[in-house]
Image (tube, rainbow, N blue to C red):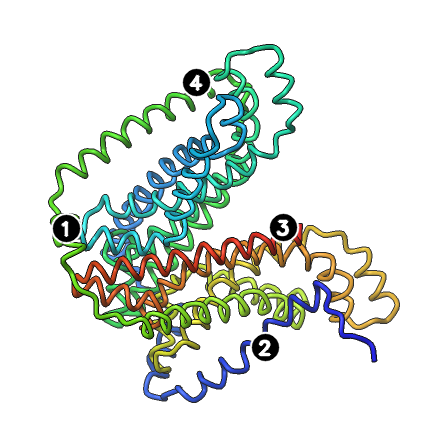
Amino acid sequence: MNKLKLNYTSLSFLPILVCIPLGYQLINNIHLGGFKLFQEFLIYAFNPKTDNEIIITVIKRLNETILIGFFSWLVSIIFGAIFGIISSNIFYKIFNIPNFFYLIIRLFLTIIRSIHEVVWGILLMQIYGINFSIGIIAICIPYIAVNSKVFAEQIETIDYKSFESINQINAPKFSSLLTLIWNPIINTFKNFGLYRLECSIRSTVILGLFGIGGIGTSIFLSFQTLNFRELWTYLWSLAILIILSGLIFKKIKFNTTNKILSIFFIAVFFITILFSFSYFLYFIFNNNFENFNSVSSLFKSSSDLGLFDLLKLILETIILSLLSTGIAISLPPLVIGIFNNNSSKIFVKIFAFLLRLIPTPVILLTLLTFNNPSLSLAALTLGLHNAGITSKLLFTNLDSQDKKNYNAMKSLGISKKTSWLLGLFSQQAKSYLAYCAYRSDIIIRETAIVGIIGSIGLGWQLQESLSSFAWQEVTIVLIAYSSIAIVGELINGKIKNSLT
């Protein structure tokens, strides 16, 4: 009997099996009372509110969102590049610094990267209260660590022979470092940095749902009052902002040989660093702690969280991330493969865009109108949102791929779906799975968002512990949450390396 062999194509579809237990629980939890609300939510997508008052509010809220998002992006990119340099091997080789410091910095960045910006935001709001600055700081903390990882990875691709050549001529160490890293830093900024601005805007919207400000706050208030016409006005305005920003990014070209432009970038670089330090110090020393007066309160608070309950919450969080990842991996190729004609592709792309556009908490709250809170519902929400993101990458790669094999198979009379599967998708399956391995890191961190809203896992426990000011419990939950994210990142890193 021949052994069953799984290739990359079949591995891309296999995770969809998670929908069997997930769908069973969702069907059992359906209640018909909220279907009318859900219907209204969908109908008002085509009839948003457009009077003068709402337009003025939209402009004001978008300005707040852009301000928080842009400044968070600028600070996180600049400090991400700095930490990327000092967390790369080349920096320690040039300046002959012991590797001990390299390991400490890498560990520090890994820990702060493992905690989602929403968690940072909720923690800071609990300590300082609701403040405009909280959104900027909450986004910057994990984004700096994420950006530094990307910059460090690109810097470490530098050929070691280049380092030896510069080292042999006894050039100044700082000049040697700048010569080696300049091109990787600029190329990373071109290919990755501008994309992070869109991510920063999306994170600002998510934090707005928790009261930080911007258009996210208006979206949440509209949903609370079930004013779906107003809600869709904010969502469509957010869509326009994201689309326009994407078009602008594509038009931006950086000419690094232009001296005036280089001087401008250097000036922005140093001004941002100085302003960020002064602003951070002002914020720390001129804002009173709301509910966390001293470090000693951490040790005074008691914890009612038992070991069994903690393990249960950890297991829920792991299962939630696995189910969500399964949906995010398999749903896009399955749907695109079934609806692979030109007219259907348009509808699939629109639906995927809406899944990316609508914040995860809003999707979950909408589904809660006709389904009880459960692990399956949280997994479906997180999975659908990330499926919208993975489908965008898959569509882009498939559209740019050579279609010779696909056309040849169709000309031989092979069905269109089979031709698409074997002639197109099979060539993309390996790189698609590698991206999904990276995406699963983000999904693990995003479990906190749906956990808080859907009363699931460590996210829910974090919210409960913060509400009762049980700082010892908060610390335990954060350690558990961070540990899951770090272990998941290590595992996904091994998977990604085996696929590239």
For the residues carrying marks 2 and 3, which lies nearer the camera in this image?
3
Residue 296: mark: 1
Asked if marks 3 and 1 touch (Cβ < 8 Å), the reply is no
Residue 50: mark: none
Badge 3 is on which residue? Answer: 497
- Mark earlier in primary sequence (3, 1): 1
Badge 4 is on which residue? Answer: 263
Q: Measure the C-alpha gap from mark 3 to mark 4.
A: 38 Å
For the residues carrying marks 2 and 4, which lies nearer the camera in this image?
2
Residue at 62% of width from left, 13% of height from top? Answer: 168
Say which element carries label 2: helix
Inspect the image, locate mark 3, and give the three-letter code of the amino acid beneath it.
Asn
Tell me the quarter of the image containing the N terminus: bottom right
For the residues carrying marks 1 and 4, which lies nearer the camera in this image?
1
Q: Measure the C-alpha gap from mark 3 to mark 1.
A: 44 Å
Asked if marks 2 and 4 touch (Cβ < 8 Å), the reply is no
Q: Measure the C-alpha gap from mark 2 to mark 3.
A: 25 Å
Residue at 29% of width from left, 26% of height from top? Answer: 274
Asked if marks 2 and 3 touch (Cβ < 8 Å), the reply is no
| Depth order, front residue of 368/322 | 322
Side of 436 where 314 appears, left or right: left
| Depth order, front residue of 187/143 | 143
Q: Farthest right residue?
A: 412
Q: Position of residue 278 (x, y in %)?
A: 23, 29
Inspect the image, locate mark 4, and give the three-letter code of the amino acid beneath it.
Ile
Residue at 23% of width from left, 67% of height from top? Answer: 464
- Mark earlier in primary sequence (1, 2): 2
